[in-house]
Image (cartoon, rainbow, N blue to C red):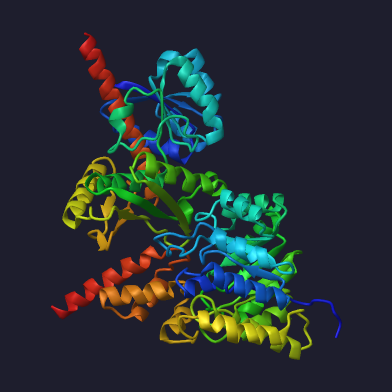
Amino acid sequence: MGKVKVGIIGSGNIGSDLMIKLANSDELELTAMMGIDLTSRGMKHAQYLGLQVFDNGVDGLLDHPDLVDIVFDATSAGAHVHNAEVAKKLGKQMLDLTPAAIGPFVAPTVNLGEHLEADNVNLITCGGQATIPIIHAINQVANVEYGEIVATISSKSAGPGTRANIDEFTETTAKAIEEVGGANKGKAIIILNPAEPPILMRDTVHAVVEEGTMDQAKITNSVLEMAKKVQSYVPGYNVRTEPIFDGNKVTVFLEIEGAGHYLPKYAGNLDIMTAAAVKVAEEFAKNRANLSANRA
Amino acid sequence: MSNQIDIKLTEVALRDGSHAVSHQFTVDQVTSVAKALNEAKVPYIEVTHGDGLGGSSLQYGLSGTDELKLIEAAVSVADFSKIAVLLLPGIGTIEDLKVAAGLGAKMARIATHVTEADVSKQHIETAKTLGLETVGFLMMSHMAPVEKLVEQAKLMESYGADTIYVVDSAGALLPHEVKDRIKALRQELTVNIGFHGHNNLSLAMANTLVAIEEGATRIDGSIRCLGAGAGNTQTEVLVAVLERMGIHTGVDLYKMMDIAEEIVAPILPKPQEINRDSLTLGYAGVYSSFLLHANRAAEKFSVDSRDILIELGKREIIGGQEDMIIDVAAELEKKKKQLQL
């Protein structure tokens, strides 16, 4: 069974980081980079790698529909609407890394199995990818009535898109804490810290569990097990201390060091998004292989 | 004395003071304070959770009473004073702002860390569209050099803010530093300049006077110092001082003294003094609302709260990072135990 072919729309930081990660994948073969400016750093690198490049974005695929099976969208919420339409028309699976969220939210360790054949899935937010697995892990052993997360990222790793639409982060993450994490109610806060040298991404998860369901040992176990699963595709993902308990409340401190592929190590927030997206695409690819094997 | 108002005051006790009462203001308290401030002719009264709209959280403390009910209560008794709300992008959202405006808030104060003004663009623009007087609030102003502060203030001005505040959230600025900042903003901006101080180093009044001297015309105060840390510039005292200087605020001094004594003092959990912890906030340059959180963490982990605050200052922790208090306290406890072994 050969590798599944994938393409990237958007040659900025996220798209460039994806290029490096995909080069190391056993299941995926990156064939195309769809941008708007052939002279940009990302597009030049794509040409250097020998990829097929298009300067008309996703529309490039219209004439080369067999070039890819799965598409990563690393553009913007506004651009995603058209990108999603084209991908759907061509029957390509779409992984949305923008805040558009047309398709269902996915966190690889939580609900990916439910969406393996979806035509469009959304990767939530960096804070969501870091914290929702933990909320889910707690919720598996004690009903989470309220889940709140605080994502602190270095100012340098927050791009203009995030800055101009910061409400999208808080609103999308809060929604996904409920829909994917399983909390009855969710809230998200984001802080940009300008310290130099830049700080690593940190996330704090606060959860209030239902009266009478608190079991410290079980929660600690479940959280640490989940952290291991996330580490399998984000090696720099770490629980800083054992969970801290206070009555019905549990607090978990996380730190995410990026892999340092295209983006510096402090940009764990960007790394966890691209790593999660690659993980989702790999699972899509395995599922495709299984399906065709079953048909054979 | 002319009737022209030289300096417009904003009373922040019902917002900044929210920290000092662990966000437990009641509708009755807010109603009685706002009603009295309205009668004393205070131009603006800020009412919100201490961390702004949407601040009620495990991270900062859950509100005892929904802040929207408190805003509504204040609006209902203020026919002279305008009710202001604070919003920190990243915590509160545009939706929260719309709801507050719908309840009758007339001023939006959009706050960011001093280097992160660009996250406020949508919020400032929306506030203007909603017809609100809009303030850009540059917090932790002591952490950036003057040029950076000017650059960030210009951004907020370009988004449409009517006033830009130098906010000394840690109460760490010294008078000459306030002077340099306000002077530079006065030269570079056309909008109003404001100053918000904290009294952790006993400099709130001195800093406020320097700010006024350099051209600030919008000043924040908290009555009876009901604000985070050691509180802010004490409003009733400021009114008296400015009157002595011949600077007109339009605020009734006697009434302010009475409110401080009879209505606000009984609300305070303890008198607002500069104690070793609030002094450490100013000395270490740490966000004033960390005070009670650091006290609690010090107790839980059996460490000195001053050590926690100094360490937070060293790490350049900024406003909103209350989770770091527990994190640092847990680390200090670990170190202490290792030393004892």
Q: Nearer the viewer, residue A98 or B181?
A: A98
x then y, percent, for residue B81: 71, 69
Asked if A8 appears above or below B64 in the picture, the reply is above
Q: Residue at x 65, y 54 (%)?
A: B101
Say whether residue A247 is visible: yes
Q: Could you say which quadrant of the image residue B189 lies in?
A: bottom right
Q: Give me the residue at 39% from left, 72% from top.
A: B293
Q: Is residue B48 above or below residue B125?
A: below
Examine the rendering and report whether any part of residue B115 can be seen.
no
Residue most extreme to the bottom:
B244
- The foreground one among A276 and B91 is B91
Q: Is residue B250 toward the left or the right of residue A120 in the image? A: right
> In the image, is B1 to the left or to the right of B163?
right
Quarter of the picture containing the N terminus of chain B is: bottom right
- Residue A8, given in percent of the width and then of the height, sits at 43, 29
Residue visible at 73% across and 70% down in the picture: B186
How far from the left and from the top, in percent, is residue A288?
Answer: 28, 19
